[in-house]
Image (cartoon, grey):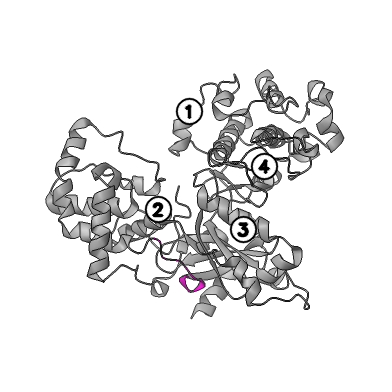
Amino acid sequence: MLDDVVGDVQSAGLASIIQKGLPGNMKKKIPKETEQGKIDAMKLKIQQNYDMQKAYTDGFGNLFLERYSQVAGVDLTLPKTNRRMSRRISAGGLSEDNKAVMQEHWEPFAQSEQFTEWAAYKCNESTFATDKDFVEMRALGKGAFGAVFLVFNKYSGQGFATKMMKKKMIKEKGNFDSVKVEKEVLSKCESKFLVNLHYSYMTDTHVCLVLNLMAGGDCAFLLKQYCSKPGGAVDPPGGEEGVKFYTVSMALGLQDLHDSGFVYLDLKPANVLLNEKGYVRISDMGLTYDISGGPSKRRAGSPGYWPPEVINQKPYTTQPDWWSLGATVYAMMTDQRLFKNDEKTLDPDHIKNFEWANSCTWSPEIKDFIQQLCTIDMEKRITSVSKMLDHPWLRGFDVAGLNANMFKPPITPDVNNLNCPKPEEIGDFGKVAEDVPYDKEDDKMWSDWSYTNPALYANEMSMAMDSKKGGSGGGGGGGCCTIS
């Protein structure tokens, strides 16, 4: 049966596959704990670490609070949309009256059947996934060590992009550290402006990262597909106002990485992905570096986007990412590189005397904004979101609205027009030399690879449970591609 389903979707449009989701007869029942002792221990743990308002932000907690409120006949003001948001959502927006009602019902809720159900499901939110938990539907693209596939979780029906990397190829290329870094960074930093890691698991031959499904392609593809005009002209996505949307989204993702103790080092349009609605997330953390212990002199990045301090291996912390943001903003306006080579990057007069591309109209404010990001003097460079938002080009930008997905993205991608590779194009990719040895000793490198993000798991499964009861989200399981 599975072979028939996968065969049918290989030639179908990606949007159709995602919308249909996983056939109902292929889904499994969402697991919950049945051993009473473990459930009681979890109930006690919840009571010690949660109150009503904190429970409001937990995926399973929110769902079962809503069910309790229906049974008890009390309005606890628990909008379902909060289970679509990150765990940073708080109940701070509630009125004092609502807070009082919620607090009054905490103890009765803790004694309820719904509270027990919450504990039973929460017992499994850190259980490691395996390849048996997913249905692989079709290839989405090629990666450095394998390929990326569209998969569906058999329990939730949720669609994901799974990066499947061959262990032998990683060993052959000597890139074990960069693969481990990507998983480490994504497991420590959760952001709606970064591609989030939901699960990681391994098989006998592959290590796998299960990530947000970003079905809209990358910004480099967006520029080629939607913005390039005859004669080499470029119509920036949404004009300067649209470019502001992408700029602030990227900056917020960078800031979240920086706040977690990392510098990204590889910002460029090809590493900024769009979901099916046009919202963006930064991806590909292979070059990200831990700076929590102090500055780095590491030389890593992409020519044309990396700054002088990286080329010259001078000490830096997060400054390179803001230079790269300026270079990326220029690329979003023109589909050209601001710095054609390292000589231009190192020339202090290049940006001062730069002849701005005449393929689009430039306001004085955006020119100054890019120049303040791409200044060689790191002390004078814009190096934070707060400083960036204080610049005249972005002053007054509604960051709260962007965080709440209240902005309409400048472009809604055509998910069916992403030029995904055909199965035969993926088949032989990543062929490893036959003489590359790999044994159990090599496998010890991956001993800590398995991971589940508890908060994202709770969001994912609670949304699926809610949709089965006739609530919002997903229907067939594939309609909601990301947990925003």
Q: Position of residue 302 (x, y in %)?
A: 75, 44
53 in relation to 36, above or below:
above
- The amino acid beneath tag 4 is Leu
Q: CA distance from mark 3 to mark 4?
A: 19 Å
Q: Earlier in the sequence, mark 4 or mark 2?
A: 4
Q: Which residues are magenta?
A: 126-133
Q: CA distance from mark 4 to mark 2?
A: 27 Å
Q: Are marks 3 and 4 in contact (CB under 8 Å)?
A: no
Q: Can you tell which mark lies on residue 455?
A: 2
Q: Give the labeled residue for mark 4.
A: 267
- The amino acid beneath tag 3 is Lys
Q: Give the labeled residue for mark 3.
A: 180
Q: Secondary structure at mark 4?
A: loop
The answer, for residue 407, to whether it is visible in the render is yes
Q: Give the labeled residue for mark 1.
A: 398
Q: Position of residue 69 (x, y in %)?
A: 18, 49
Discs 4/1, front: 4
Q: Earlier in the sequence, mark 1 or mark 2?
A: 1
Discs 4/2, front: 2
